[in-house]
Image (tube, helix red, strand yellow):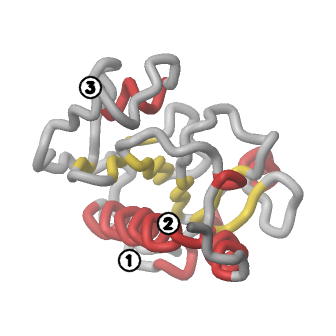
Amino acid sequence: MAGVEDTQPAQVEVSKASSVLAEGYDKKCIFCKIVNNEMGTELLHCDEEISCFPDIKPGAPHHYLVVPNKHVGNCKSLRKEHVPLVKRMVETGKQILQKNNVTDLSDVRFGFHWPPFCSVTHLHLHVLAPASQMGFMSRLVYRLNSYWFITADQLIDLLNSKEETN
């Protein structure tokens, strides 16, 4: 078992209401709207750089999306200099899981859908726990070593192998 006591997300005090309406905001992007409190979606975490909210179609008892507050394209558009952002997204996901009593971080899946297999082009990390409790369809959609899903570690390795851009 993955150390899950309750499947209801913990209420997290939002430290700062996000307002990146100018630069870094795509008015057609649903995640930009969520981060800017235009959709009424519960934010489990919000700081200057990153926000987190529950996935509307959870693939596991705990399924959260961690996104940058400023609009960043999908993971294919990232460069080596984005590695710290991806690492911070993973750390935020771990913090949210811990606040929701998920203690077995070995039974967690952190990853991104690889384009063109992403429904929203705003960069978003899927945080799923416990992975062992994912249903058949979720195991397929968030399948490791597939053409359509890449783990956070795989993405970081891929970005680190790229040349620095100026």
- Say which amino acid is labelled 3: Asn
The answer to whether residue 120 is visible is yes
What is the number of callouts on the image? 3
Helix, strand or loop for disc 3: loop
Asked if residue 39 is positioned above or below residue 75 in the image, the reply reads above
Please determine whether, in this image, residue 133 is positioned above or below residue 65. below
Q: CA separation, marks 3 and 1?
A: 30 Å
Q: CA distance from mark 2 to mark 3?
A: 23 Å
Density class for disc 1 (Cα within 10 Å; few <14, some 14-19, many ≥20) is some
Q: Which residue: 55% across, 58% down?
A: 128
The disc placed on residue 103 is 1
Q: Dot 2: what SS?
A: helix
Q: Are the two marked residues, 2 and 3, in contact with CB atoms closer than 8 angstroms?
A: no
Residue pointed to by mark 2: 86
**131, 91: nearer the viewer:** 91
Instruction: Say few, some or many: other residues with alpha carbon within 10 Å of mark 2 (under 14 / 14 to 19 / 20 or more).
Output: many
Quadrant of the image containing the C terminus: bottom right
Taking the image as shown, residue 120 lies to the left or right of residue 25, namely right
Picture coordinates of residue 112 (x, y %)?
A: 65, 55
Tell me where residue 147 appears, x and y as whole percent. Answer: 88, 57
Task: Identify which residue, 6 or 129, lies in the foreground.
Answer: 129
Q: Is residue 90 left or right of residue 46?
A: right
Question: Based on the displayed image, in which of its 4 quarters is residue 164 positioned?
Answer: bottom right
Q: Tell me which label, 2 or 3, sits earlier in the chain.
A: 3
Q: Amino acid at mark 2?
A: Val
